[in-house]
Image (spheres, grey):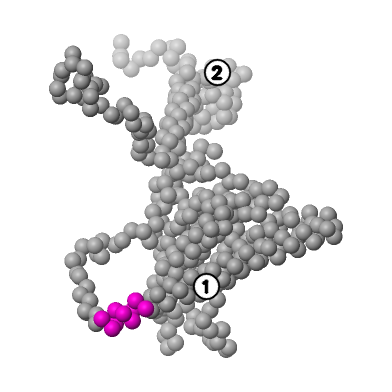
Amino acid sequence: ETPESVSPYALCYFSSCSSWLPQRVPLRGSHWQSSLLEFRTSLPVRAQPKKKKKVDVKKEQAQKERMKKKLKKLEKAAPELIPIEDFITPLKYSESNRVRSLPALSPEESERRVLLLKKWCLFKQKQDEAEKKAIKALVESQQEALKELRLESEELYQAAVRRDEGLFPFERDGPTYTPPLPGYDPPEGKCIDITKVYTQ
Amino acid sequence: DAFLGCHRSYRSRPTHGIGRFKYLLPKEVPKRKKEKVQMKEISTGTEYQYGDINIQMTSYDLCLVEHFAQYVHRLCNRLSIRVNESYAMPTKTNEVLFLEERGSKMQLDAVLTTHQRVIQIRGLSSTFAPILLEVIQSNQPEGVHLLMKQHTEADFKSRLKSRPELEELLAEIS
């Protein structure tokens, strides 16, 4: 008995392997096609795919809950006002101990100043009183005009007393010392906004 | 408290607790440390009255705008117009660059700070509004820009710090 002897069945199997396959199952197209079924179908495998789905959904839910918790925490904190730089004195002005030494005033000078102050106070008082009087006069004349209008026609009076929707927004630039120069050619340039942005 | 407050414990004597007075004072409400910045209700006003109006004064000069704001506030007090709030908006800083005549380089001209003060009034009657406007305009100093508009939620929100994290989260969730 030589080890090279092969059983007759095996020989028969090898010689007619193609004809041994049942005819109804199609041949495999190539060695890349792992299953004997049609293209892009596979036998239900109870391994990787389903696990992926469950884990994904759970992960997404957990992520969403984490985000919601974060949101709640952030929303709990009250919003803060932006600090106003005008009201914060820079440190360099409070650190140094410089003291200004003023010259001594002569009595005539101090007398002159006191009298000037008094004159200024009187001027301002007169100005303020004039303003109050003007406001009073305006209000009185307005009331009188409205009274007369009421006597004239009730409808017009009602329309006059209603509020003016076109009044606001109202914008006005402050007056200037001199009128704009004619034919002035300003140099070209640009403005960069360097305001500090505060975030909470 | 009488038993704990005193250091002389003659509880049987009729003079016990003779120095007590705190129970006679009105009860003090404990100070709340932080007051949450909440938006007050914005009133729209009736047909004969304007609702919340903001008088915004803007200028490059701080002292001028500050004094003008004080003047307007006192004027409203004198004319018995209710002043809801009087606050300052955050300062804006601008760098002004100009192009040199002979050259292509931008040169720094100045750094300007813009200051804004806001006075919020309520219940201005329709007949008195033009008078008030006239008075404020006649006293408007040079360089101070006046703007009167109705108060909105957006105006209030512009005073608050921005919260990019919150906005990001909200964008992600929705």
Where does the C terminus of chain B fall, quadrant-wise? top right
Instruction: Please identify the residue farthest to the front as the structure is shown.
Output: B14
Assign a secondary structure to mark 1. Answer: helix
Q: Would residue B142 be found to the left or right of residue A91 on screen?
A: right
Magenta span includes B68: no
Question: Which labelled disc corresponds to residue A21?
Answer: 2
A155, A173: nearer the viewer:
A155
- Please report the bounds of the magenta region as a residue range: A107-115
Camera-near label (1 vs 2) is: 1
Choose top left, top right, bottom left or bottom right for residue B125.
bottom right
Mark 1 chain: A
Question: Which labelled disc corresponds to residue A127?
Answer: 1
Instruction: Please identify the residue farthest to the right as the structure is shown.
Output: A153
Residue A17: x percent and y percent?
Answer: 50, 20
Question: In the rendered view, would you say A156 is above or below A49?
Answer: below
Residue A44: x percent and y percent?
Answer: 52, 19
Magenta span includes A108: yes
Assign a secondary structure to mark 2. Answer: loop
B135, A19: nearer the viewer:
B135
Q: Residue at x 21, y 17 (%)?
A: B14
How far is mark 1 from mark 2, CA to CA? 118 Å
| Amino acid beneath label 1 | Gln
User: How many residues crowd mark 2 within 10 Å: few (<14), some (14–19), many (20+)?
Assistant: few
User: How many residues crowd mark 1 within 10 Å: few (<14), some (14–19), many (20+)?
Assistant: few
Question: In the rendered view, would you say A42 is above or below A103?
Answer: above
Question: Which labelled disc corresponds to residue B101?
Answer: none
Q: Would residue A126 be found to the left or right of residue A1 on screen?
A: right
Which secondary structure dominates the residues rendered in magenta? helix
Q: Residue at x 56, y 48 (%)?
A: B153
A61, A99: nearer the viewer:
A99
Mark 2 chain: A
